């Protein structure tokens, strides 16, 4: 399983580096945009204030609808696949997260370079769900939102890939990740960086 996961990581990295930022020719599905907007609106409250008993069932309903759209061939463009991936990433099972990763890689294959971060994110989340360490460093978690000192990135195999691969996939450097982790542990609202990773990594 671990070898298969590493192979998936290599495929997504090679794909994102090889793609050119081509404009999409197919029409985006407006329903997927509405589904994603509802997904994001449910996550607007601050950490620890989201009523998951209410949000969970709505997430499941949204995933079911995206499955229907996928089955009907109504998910067509790179943006469509990226939006579908974002919905599945909030799933309950490791299979949901794996589907999110597959959808994100498909979005890359459709020429949507905005899906690079999503590909890395979904791979890390999938690895965490199956009990393996993340490799890009996109996942921060805590068992107790009331105790900020417990924020962590573990388990994290940070030495497996270098910052050049993180940058190529729109992920912050190890130094930036540690700064964010310190902010979380100090109870400070993380600030969005002035220069995002993708702004320093041109499509190659």
Image: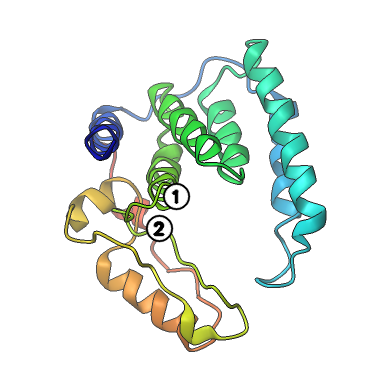
In the displayed structure image, the side of residue 25 where residue 154 appears, left or right:
left
Q: Is residue 91 visible?
A: yes
Position of residue 93 relative to residue 142, above or below, is above
* Label 1 Cα neighbours within 10 Å, binned few <14 / some 14-19 / many ≥20: many
Q: Is residue 34 visible?
A: no
- Residue 44 pos. (x, y %): 72, 62
- Residue 92 pos. (x, y %): 61, 45
State the residue in front, 198 or 50.
50
Report the mark closest to the observer, 2 or 1.
1
In the rendered image, which residue does mark 1 sit on?
A: 125
Quadrant hosting residue 163: bottom left
Please report the residue visible at 31 percent of the width from the left and 33 percent of the height from the top: 12
Please report the residue visible at 75 percent of the width from the left and 59 percent of the height from the top: 52
Label 1 secondary element: helix
Measured Cα–Cα span from mark 2 to mark 1:
8 Å
In the rendered image, which residue does mark 2 sit on?
A: 138
In the displayed structure image, the side of residue 145 where residue 50 appears, left or right:
right
Q: Quadrant of the C terminus?
A: top left
Quadrant hosting residue 113: top left
Position of residue 132 relative to residue 26, above or below, is below
- Residue 68 pos. (x, y %): 71, 19
* Label 2 Cα neighbours within 10 Å, binned few <14 / some 14-19 / many ≥20: many
């Amino acid at each position: 399983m671990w070898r298969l996961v590493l192979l998936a990581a290599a495929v997504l990295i090679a794909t994102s580096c090889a793609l050119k930022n081509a404009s999409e020719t197919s029409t985006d599905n407006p329903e997927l945009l509405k589904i994603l907007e509802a997904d994001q609106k449910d996550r607007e409250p601050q950490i620890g204030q989201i009523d998951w008993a209410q949000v969970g069932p709505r997430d499941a309903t949204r995933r079911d609808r995206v499955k229907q759209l996928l089955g009907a061939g109504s998910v067509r463009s790179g943006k469509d696949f990226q939006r579908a991936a974002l919905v599945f990433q909030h799933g309950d099972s490791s299979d949901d997260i794996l589907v999110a990763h597959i959808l994100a890689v498909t979005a890359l294959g459709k020429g949507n370079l905005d899906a690079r971060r999503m590909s890395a994110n979904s791979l890390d989340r999938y690895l965490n769900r199956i009990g393996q360490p993340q490799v890009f460093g996109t996942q921060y978690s805590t068992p107790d939102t009331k105790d900020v000192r417990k924020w962590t990135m573990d388990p994290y195999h940070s030495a497996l890939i270098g910052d050049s691969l993180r940058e190529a996939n729109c992920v912050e450097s190890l130094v930036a990740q540690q700064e964010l982790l310190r902010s979380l542990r100090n109870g400070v609202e993380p600030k969005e960086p002035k220069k995002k990773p993708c702004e320093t990594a041109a499509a190659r």
